[in-house]
Amino acid sequence: MLGCSPSENGPFVRRSLVVLGVYVTVTAAVALGFIAKVIPGPLTIPAALLPIVPAAFFPFVLLDKLRDMDELQRKIQYEAMAFAFAMAALLTLSFGFLQEFANFPDVNWVWVWPVMGFLWMIGIVLGRRRYA
Amino acid sequence: MRNRLRELRAERAWSQADLADRLDVSRQTVNALEVEKYDPSLPLAFKLARLFGLPIEAIFSDESSAD
């Protein structure tokens, strides 16, 4: 992951898993709360946004990892993120036009990030090949 | 840019991982430098020069390498 060896990725993976674990737990708790209808009306918006609190730690975990990388790894990340950014723009624009003019269904916004993350991983693989 | 990193490393019987440790970079970065797919920053070039005890121009030449 992220273009480094497994040993170099150890702390990043551990910290990411902690963030992911708390995020999944909070998301499940919130979803159960909504399904069981135990969340009072005025708390609907804060409760719906609660999973973002643990997720908000991920950018800091990622930035720490980027700052630890050497110059080539950082360059690979930069190119991978540029690839993901541009490809996500193309995909979202395409889908937006298809929704507007070809009656494509609405898709939940939570899917935007997984798609971008997937494109980021593709960018890393391409970058690793380019400099291998 | 061309370089003599593989030759200099071999003279010292260091593995790519040994050189990576000494430079505080990843093994992948050492490999990319050796196969001339990546040109180092000036700080990294100076670090290499200090490590091998040679001037930078004795390690790198600005003759372009074939990609």
Image: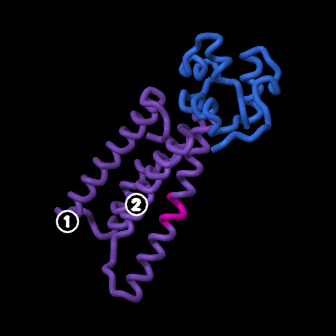
Chain colours: A purple, B blue
Residue drawn at 54 percent across, 32 percent down: B28
Q: Is residue B47 magenta-colored?
A: no
The single residue placed furthest to the top in the displayed view is B12
Q: Residue type at mark 1?
A: Lys
Q: Residues within 10 Å of mark 2 (few under 14, many from 20)?
A: some
Q: CA distance from mark 1 to mark 2?
A: 31 Å
User: Do discs 1 and 2 share a chain?
Assistant: yes
Q: Is residue A40 left or right of residue B7?
A: left
* Element marked by disc 2: helix
N-terminal of the two: label 1 or label 2? 1
The single residue placed furthest to the bottom in the displayed view is A101
Magenta stretch prevailing secondary structure = helix
B19 above or below A42? above
B25 above or below A128? above
Q: Which residue is mark 2?
A: A115
B36 above or below A86? above
Rendering coords of residue B40 (x, y %) = 70, 35
Q: Which mark is residue A22?
A: none
Q: Which residue is mark 1?
A: A37
Q: Number of callouts in the render?
A: 2
Q: Is residue B36 left or right of residue A53?
A: right
Rendering coords of residue B55 (x, y %) = 82, 21
Q: Residue type at mark 2?
A: Val
1 vs 2, front mark: 2
Question: Bounds of the magenta span?
Answer: A84-88
Q: Quadrant of residue A99?
A: bottom left
Residue drawn at 45 percent across, 76 percent down: A94
Q: Chain of mark 2?
A: A
